[in-house]
Image: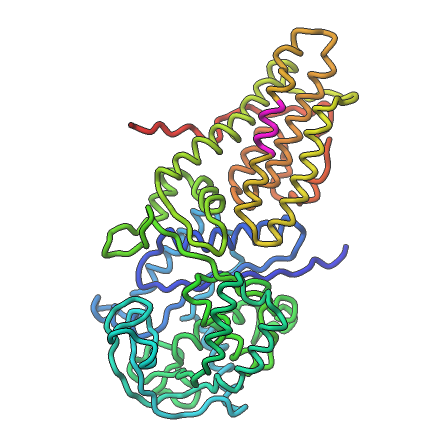
Amino acid sequence: MAEKEPFYITTPIYYPSANLHIGHAYCTTIADSIARFRRLAGYDVFFLTGSDEHGQKIQQKAEEMGTTPLGYVDPIVANFQKLWEKLGISNDDFIRTSEKRHEAVVQEIFRRIQAKGDIYKGEYKGLYCVPCESYWTERQIEDGKCPDCGRAVQEVAEESYFFKLDNYADRLLAHIEAHPEFIEPASRRNEMINFIKQGLEDLSISRTSFDWGVPVPGDEKHVIYVWFDALTNYLTPIGFLDDPEKFAKFWPADIHLVGKEIVRFHTIIWPCILMALDLPLPKQVYGHGWLIVDGDKMSKSKGNVVDPMLLIDEFGADAIRYFLLREINLGQDGNFSRDALITRINADLANDLGNLLHRTLSMIKKYHGGELREVVGEDAIDASLREMAAATVRDYEAQMKNMEISTAVKTTWAFVSRANKYIDEKTPWTLAKDEAKAQDLICTMANLAESLRIISVLVSPFMPVTAKRIREQLGLTDIDGVQLDEARSWRVIPAGHRVGTPEQLFPRIEVEK
């Protein structure tokens, strides 16, 4: 058997200062759907998510709560993991920056870059925003406030280690120009090119004002500062230090999926660290947009932060996943609203997909006792359904490989609509009354079952539980090992196959006026 092509995808590691909101769920759902699609298409996938646990903010919160930093983050991180489980996230590893395996990686990277002469000790003076854990120059701040969050910055001075970022600016620019796909979408790429051209300042990478972090090797009163520790998480679980074969297989990463506010760290600081280590750069950093709630940016002060746990309890994980993936074009900001979610569940999931499955199975039971029969011949309507199935799979594969997830969902649903229309065109209830049309009725039932089988494959990256339920109702048992190749074929379900019992996939949600 040929070696499977490796595919490595990551989400950002999330910061456990509080529980996660729907925006985090959005990012992780995108990454999960890409990982699941790549597995479906026959790749050997490694999918990583995790938590970024160090820093002053966590230490301060822990002190306020009268606990240790680890005691503070442990239950929050456990909630992250519980959320990903409930949302059906299929990550292969979960990295915590507080783990010993990661500390070893961070310290080794520090040593290597220091030995090269790209890390030196100096004094740091700067304007610091504690909530954002970001330093700013005079020209970057607006009226003494942080340009990112608008809160007041404070002036700090302390001894620090610095990384010579500017040593790599020219090489980085050359790389971005030679590989435009390195930063997507293009709007983010242009922002980063302009940022680098303004000149890069050496990066302060250690702190002495707190101790919750990875100690600097050989100088324990310093801890390694957030981005230098956080970004290197992507190397730890794929064997940077302990499994050279695995590392050679999965590095460089295929996609770092990140929110647009951290594109700069991932496309400037991170590549410079990798260049200093003589490691290849990731193939792509993709900056997705933000989730706006009812037209407004989410914030605790506005009280409009949406808790994904509660939504999943109310509507089920697959409905939430479907909404997030369909509704938002990757790279742009998207709007989340409860009304829009309910509308989608009723129209697309209960009506279009749920009804198609229920009607099909009920008719196979009613007309043929639940059994599919031998098909002979087809007419023009049958042929057009079969041709659209093939075209749908082709388009879907190209769209998913191109990160056009919302388009791929819509492509799949256009085929769901086509299958519904096929029922209206063939009118099985009329065919059933005419003995001369018996063969046509057999063909119609088989084609609907085939359409649903193909749909079950295509929806599996978006809605894994629903895909499984469709297959169970169709009486197909090979649920876990399904590959995309199966969707390219027509007439896979053999004559004599018995379908299962129809059950409602998505009950309609009654909206009180």
Residue 10 in view here: no
Q: Position of residue 186 (x, y in %)?
A: 53, 63
Which of the image's four quarters has the N terminus?
bottom right
Figure label count: 0
**Which residue lies at the image location 36% right of the left edge and 48% below the top edge?**
308
Which of the image's four quarters has the C terminus?
top left
Residue 461: say if magenta. no
Residue 420: say if magenta. yes
Colouring used for the render: rainbow
Q: Position of residue 47 (x, y in %)?
A: 54, 59
Q: Position of residue 173 (x, y in %)?
A: 56, 77
**Which residue lies at the image location 52% right of the left edge and 46% below the top edge?**
406
> As displayed, is residue 362 above or below residue 50?
above
Q: Position of residue 465 (x, y in %)?
A: 51, 40
Q: Foreground residue, 299 or 459?
A: 299
Q: Foreground residue, 63 or 17?
A: 17
Magenta-highlighted residues: 415-422
**Which residue lies at the image location 55% right of the left edge and 21% below the top edge?**
359
> As displayed, is residue 446 above or below residue 280?
above
Residue at the far right: name it.
377
Q: Is residue 402 left or right of residue 511?
A: right
**Which residue lies at the image location 53% right of the left edge and 75% below the top edge?**
271
In terms of image quadrants, where is residue 340?
top left
Q: Foreground residue, 383 or 119?
A: 383
Q: Is residue 385 left or right of residue 286?
A: right
| Magenta span dominant secondary structure | helix
Q: Foreground residue, 378 or 60?
A: 378
Residue 374 in view here: yes
